[in-house]
Amino acid sequence: MKIVGIVGSNADFSYNRLLLNFIAKKFKKLIDVEVLDIKDVPMFNQSNDQTDSDLIQHLNKKILAADGVIIATPEYNHSIPSALQSVLEWLSFRIHPLDGKPVMIVGASYDVQGSSRSQLHLRQVLDAPGVNAVVMPGNEFLLGEVHKAFDEERNLKDSETTQFLESCIKKFIRFINVVNVMDSPDGMKDLSSTEDLYATGSIDTTIEGINMSDDDWVEQAATKTNAVEGNTYVKLDRGILTVDQINQFLKSMPAELTYADSNNQFLYYNYKYEAEDMLAARRPEQVGNPLAECHPEKAFSGVAWVIQQLRSGKQDIVRTHVPTHGPDKFVVHSYQAVRDEDGNYLGINEYVRDIKPTIDWYLEQTGQQLTGGGVDAVSGATSKVDTVSGATVKDK
Amino acid sequence: MKNLIAIVGTNSDNSTNRMLLHFIQKHFADRANIEVCEIKDLPGFNKPKDRTAPVQVQKLSDKITQADGVIISTPEYNHSVPAVLKSTLEWFSYTTQPLIDKPVMITGASYGRLGSSRSQAHLRQILDAPELKARIMPSSEFLLGLSLQAFDENGDLKDQRKIDELDAIFEDYLQFVDITNQLVNSNKAHKQRAQKFSWEDN
Ligand SMILES: Cc1cc2nc3c(=O)[nH]c(=O)nc-3n(C[C@@H](O)[C@@H](O)[C@H](O)COP(=O)(O)O)c2cc1C
Ligand SMILES: Cc1cc2nc3c(=O)[nH]c(=O)nc-3n(C[C@H](O)[C@H](O)[C@H](O)COP(=O)(O)O)c2cc1C
């Protein structure tokens, strides 16, 4: 997600700039933040229109291209600084790049109140018809006594503050998604925003307090939950196995199995082969990641669509053939909804199989042959008309 | 007669707030000496290391210090005070602090019906900040809505009811100036305290 961060201060040294830089660095796995300065923007003057100047056009273009904007405002005399006010005047005079744009407000100031009053003013300004931004409600992130807040590495000292900031950022991501869904025209559209692919929420089983992106998420999560392993017995529906037995049993399944929960977090795969030997590559350090980190951005819309089909109950299973494995294989990805007894969506069981050996075996066992529209779906199958309709595999 | 400074809160060449202040100057010529001052050529505020005001800011500031009171007329930009007026007040708060305990009357004109009510509310809060600490006249708002249609060719307000309203507020204001200056003079300590306040030494 592309986010523009606007430094609401024109001071050479600005704590609000530090704050935005910290956000950009700390949460780079969640959002891609470009920090923009307003230092050299001229004072707004309606009698001396400089809308077309490079500086203002630069801000204009960056904001238009962004999914959302974070504004970090100091407090000057209980309000926002004139420098920021002036920028917003330029951006509401002849051009309106903030119109409909999701905006999050943060602020750092000297007072313990930490820009609370200036944030209120900023909300009112952003709400004016010429600006018309869509400001995220609540979640005020106020950094008071800012001269004591950062360490030498320019990180926030207080871990609780950082955690709260993270929760605000995650809410902002969801807020952007909601705003986008509200705004998207019907018909062909990018569906990526219909699902929280960054897993910013949580469900009952979410293991809190561990960074989902960490390579050793599994180890950290196991320690945190005192997870059992090895020869400990686990009671199942229906039977009893040791954890080792469960592992061997799942690894022996004739498919690559993956479990992602309803929060869109990748929780498990039956790790038997290394990534390069798998039909759908998985790496041990990916476990725990939000689904967004398991897919390239261009796949987000498709991934979101599949999850929506399952979550909404429109379908129980979605299958796709992935043809990139050559003619000797017919690889199918099946996305199977996992539901509880009441039908509530719990997550996805994705199983990936090469079904060609199964079909070959079936044909061999029954002595039947495949027919299909001139092009053979499974290579080597001859095009002799088959009288048994059930054995016909349609070409895709 | 009292000496008052009237500040045009905009840098726009054609300003109905400027017209309003010139009308006030003319209309109350026998009640007070009013000098209309511009802020349009002041540099934009940018925290100076030495806390020194640029010459133009210093000049305006000196006039305010010598005056009995200040009238500020503000447009409304995006429901708030225009940047150029904010910038002026930032200079004052960060350098010369001439508004401390100064009796201030706020007026405002806007093209729409609401007559800058929202920007006046912001301006009150700003003037109340510890580095400005102006004495703002309470419970009086002079809002001039539909300001493009409000003046005749002589620059006079057309609507007699608006003029009556302004007369009443201005009389109140002259009294407010007296009371405030009495109060302030009897309490010098207050001024010293305010002048010492700085966010960044806290
Ligand atoms: C960037 C910009 C934002 C404005 N926003 C408002 C507003 O929020 N409310 C309003 O009444 N007028 C708004 N206006 C119109 C004002 O210029 C006008 O109402 C103003 O108060 C007139 O003052 P003046 O004649 O002294 O320039 C806006 C104008 C500009 C250039
Ligand atoms: C003109 C001026 C007015 C200020 N007014 C306030 C204020 O009302 N409340 C506050 O908490 N800090 C105030 N401060 C202090 C700012 O919080 C401090 O300068 C802060 O570092 C500004 O953010 P920045 O570092 O991102 O520029 C003021 C500073 C200046 C220069």
Image (tube, coloured by chain):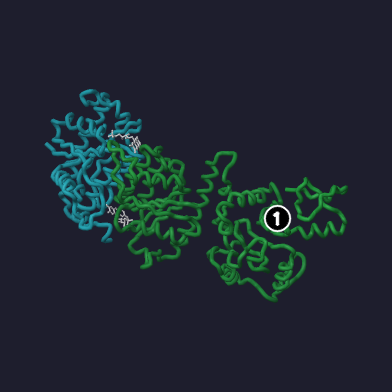
- Name the foreground residue: A13 vs A373: A373
Residue sitting at 13 percent across and 38 percent down? B2
Q: Residue furthest bottom?
A: A231
Quadrant where the N terminus of chain B sits is top left
Quarter of the image for residue A217 reads bottom right
Find disc 1 in the rendering and name its residue: A334
Is B79 on the left-hand or right-hand side of A367?
left
View quadrant of ligand 2: bottom left
Q: Position of residue A278 (x, y in %)?
A: 66, 64
Q: Is residue B68 positioned above or below A254 on the image?
A: above
When asked about the image quadrant of residue A52, the answer is top left
Is residue A322 found left or right of B13 in the rendered image?
Answer: right
Give the image location of residue B79, x and y in percent.
36, 40
Q: Secondary structure at mark 1?
A: strand
Res B181 visible: no
State the image quarter where residue B30 is shown: top left
**What residue is drawn where x is 84% and y is 53%?**
A369
Tell me if A322 is positioned left or right of A118 in this view.
right
Can you see residue A315? yes
Q: Position of residue B115 (x, y in %)?
A: 32, 33
**Three-letter amino acid code at disc 1?**
Ser
Label 1 is found on which chain of the structure? A
Q: Colour of chain B?
A: cyan
Q: How many labels, in total?
A: 1
Question: Looking at the colours in the rendered structure, which chain would you say is drawn in green?
Answer: A
